[in-house]
Image: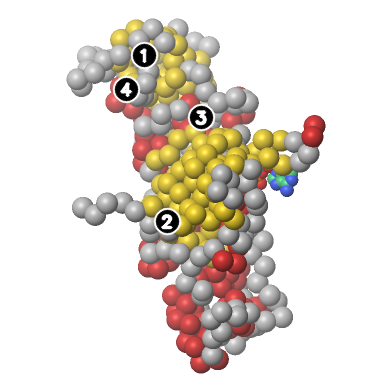
Amino acid sequence: MAEKRFMVQIEFLEKYFGEDKDRVHVLKGISLDIPEGSLYTFLGPSGCGKTTTLRCVAGLERPEGGKISIDGRPVFASGERVYIPTNKRPIGMVFQSYAIWPHMTVFENVAYPLTIQRRPRRSKSEIRQKVEEVLKVVGLHGLEDRPAPKLSGGQQQRVAFARALVNEPKVMLLDEPLSNLDAKLREQMRFEIKALQRRVNITTIYVTHDQAEALAISDQIAVMHAGKLIEVGTAHQLYSRPKRKFTATFLGLTNLIEGKVVELGGDSRPGQMETKKGIFSFVPATGLTKGETAVLSIRPEHIQVHKQQPQGLENVVEGTVKEAVFMGDAYHCQIAVGDLLLRVHTHPFLSMSPGEKVYLHLDPQSCNGLPAEDVEGMDESMLGA
Ligand SMILES: Nc1ncnc2c1ncn2[C@@H]1O[C@H](COP(=O)(O)OP(=O)(O)O)[C@@H](O)[C@H]1O
Ligand SMILES: [Mg+2]
C-alpha cells in the first residue's frame, strides 16, 4: 500500500486574541495531519476554535506560534518567519455566509475568481471552459445565465462550491457551509458534499458544531474543545470506541457510570469496574490503569431490555421504566436504576410503559472504560444524558 501523504500539516499552533488583560488564549498547541484526498472535520462546541484554526490555514489569521504546511510547503512558520498570504495559498473557501453575488448570473459568480486573476491571466474562452467544467461537477450545467437570486438555497450553495473549486485549489475549506439551509435540505446536502468531494477527490477541511453532520460526512473527525484537540478518529472509531469522556458525550448520546478499575483485563479478557451499581465488565481505553477512578460509557442502543431476569449474563441490572417515548424506529426510554437514570433505546416492537420493572443488559463489548479526568470547563449540559 502506498504511504499516506498529508496535504495539510499543523504543528503546535498557538493563537491569542486581544491585548493585555483582555488577551485570550484561543488555540493551545493544535497539531494535526490531514491526509491527501480526505474529508477531515473539525468538530466541537461553539467557541472552541474551529473557525480560528481554519482561518489560520487560509492565512486570514496570523498565529502567534507553530507551523502550517500545505502540500509539503510551509505557509506559516513562526520560528522561520514564514508567512504566505491568502491569495498565494492553494485553497478554496466556502464560509457560513457563503455570499454569492446577487447582481451576477451563475456563470459570472463562478468565473469571478478567474477574471480577477492576474497571473496567469486567462483568456475568455479558457475561463468559459473552466467554468463549464466546474458547473458540470456540481450539477449546475445549463443554469449559466440564471441570475443568482433565482436559485434555490441548495443551488446557491452549489454555486459557492463551484466558485471555490474553479481555481483548482489543493485544499477546500468549508466553515459550517450548510448552516443557512433548512433542516431537510441540510441533511440532503450532506450526501451531495460527500459525493462531490469524492468525485473531485480534493482534500477538504470541514468545520461544524453539528455532531450528526460530522458523523455523516467525514473520513476523519478531530474533536476540539476549548482550543485543544481532544481526539482524532473515524466516525466509527469515535462513536464506538471513544478514548475520552468528552468525545463519548459530545458525539451522540451516552450513559456514564462512575467507578474504579479493579481489573484491567487483556488477552481478550474484559476489564472489571467497581461501581455503586455493582461490578461491570468493560473494554478499557488505552492508558487506563488498575486502581484508577474511571467512567463506564455505554450508548443507549447498546443496552438490551429484558422483561424477565436473563440467566447466565454479566452486566445485568434491575431498573424501573420512568419514561418511554415512541420515536418510530425505537422507543427512547429513561430507566431508573436506583438513583441512576439511564437512557435506553429499544426495538419499537418491544412496548414499554412507565412504572414497569425491567432488567438491563449492558453489553460488555460496548462498555467503554474511560479516564474520569477530562477536559477543563466541561459541564453537565454537555453530557448527552
Ligand atoms: N477576532 C476575534 N477577536 C477576539 N476574539 C475572537 C475573535 N475571533 C474569535 N474569537 C474568540 O476565539 C474563540 C474561538 O472562536 P472560533 O474559532 O470562532 O470558535 P468556533 O468556530 O469553534 O465556534 C472564541 O472564544 C471567540 O470568541
Ligand atoms: Mg465557527
- Mark 2 or mark 3, which has the lower sequence index? 2
Location of mark 3 (residue):
246
Q: Nearer the viewer, mark 2 or mark 3?
A: 2
Location of mark 4 (residue):
283
Residue found 51% across the figure and 19% down from its top: 373
Q: Is residue 31 visible?
A: yes
- Residue 72's disc is 2
Say above or below: 156 vs 184.
below
Indicate the position of residue 235 as horizontal and vertical percent values.
Answer: 40, 43
Q: CA distance from mark 2 to mark 4?
A: 39 Å
Location of mark 1 (residue):
289
Q: CA distance from mark 4 to mark 1?
A: 12 Å
172 relative to 97 in the view: left or right: left
Q: Secondary structure at mark 3?
A: helix
Amino acid marked by disc 1: Thr
Say if mark 4 contacts mark 3, CB within 8 Å: no
- Mark 3 or mark 1, which has the lower sequence index? 3
